[in-house]
Image (spheres, rainbow, N blue to C red):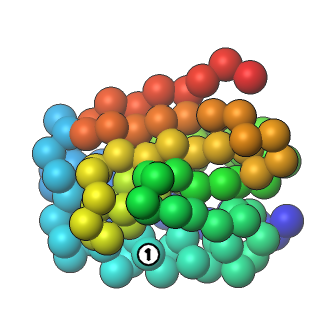
Amino acid sequence: MKAFHLSCAAALCVTSMACAGGIAPSKELVPEATALLKSEIAAGNFTGYDCFKNEALIDPRVWRSVPATTKENITTTVAVVCYGEGQGYEATIKDARSGQRLATFSYGRYEVHPQ
């Protein structure tokens, strides 16, 4: 597990008017979101993502170690990536070990699931 950098995704989407109120993000955001997600996979923080299922698997130690705003940014970034791959603007983050659902994002609505 290495330092987690998706907190910078806030500038990418969460604070962007392009994503406010569940409006689909600008396609211009997709390459940066994809690069961020792939760098986190390379760092070992994610085990992968599947946009056909609109989900990503995250190391549970990483999930527990980041603040709530970063968790929202993580989930939103995956939704932007999947939107860019032709899927809905939504994502589910799952624990890579247990498969338990940790958080979901769907068209502007973010929810953390009890663990």
Q: Quadrant of the C terminus?
A: top right
Which percent across, then down, holds residue 104?
Answer: 47, 36
Q: Is residue 43 visible?
A: yes
Q: Is residue 39 left or right of residue 97?
A: left
Task: Pick the residue in front: 60 or 99.
Answer: 99
Give the vertical position of 35 relative to 93 (above or below). below
Q: Is residue 77 visible?
A: no
Determine the residue positioned at 78% across, 71% down.
44
Determine the residue positioned at 54% across, 70% down.
37
Give the image quarter of residue 7: bottom right
Task: Pick the residue in front: 34 or 69.
Answer: 34
Which percent across, then down, holds residue 108?
Answer: 27, 37
Q: Determine whether the residue tagged by mark 1 lies in a helix, strand or loop.
A: helix
Residue lying at the far top of the rendered structure: 114
Which percent across, then down, holds residue 95?
Answer: 73, 44
Which percent across, then down, holds residue 14?
Answer: 34, 48
Residue lying at the far front of the rendered structure: 52
Graded by Cα atoms within 10 Å as few (under 14), some (14 to 19) or many (20 or more), the crowding at tag 1 reads some
Q: Which residue is mark 1?
A: 34
Give the vertical position of 34 relative to 54 (above or below). below
Determine the residue positioned at 14% across, 45% down.
23
Determine the residue positioned at 17% across, 52% down.
24
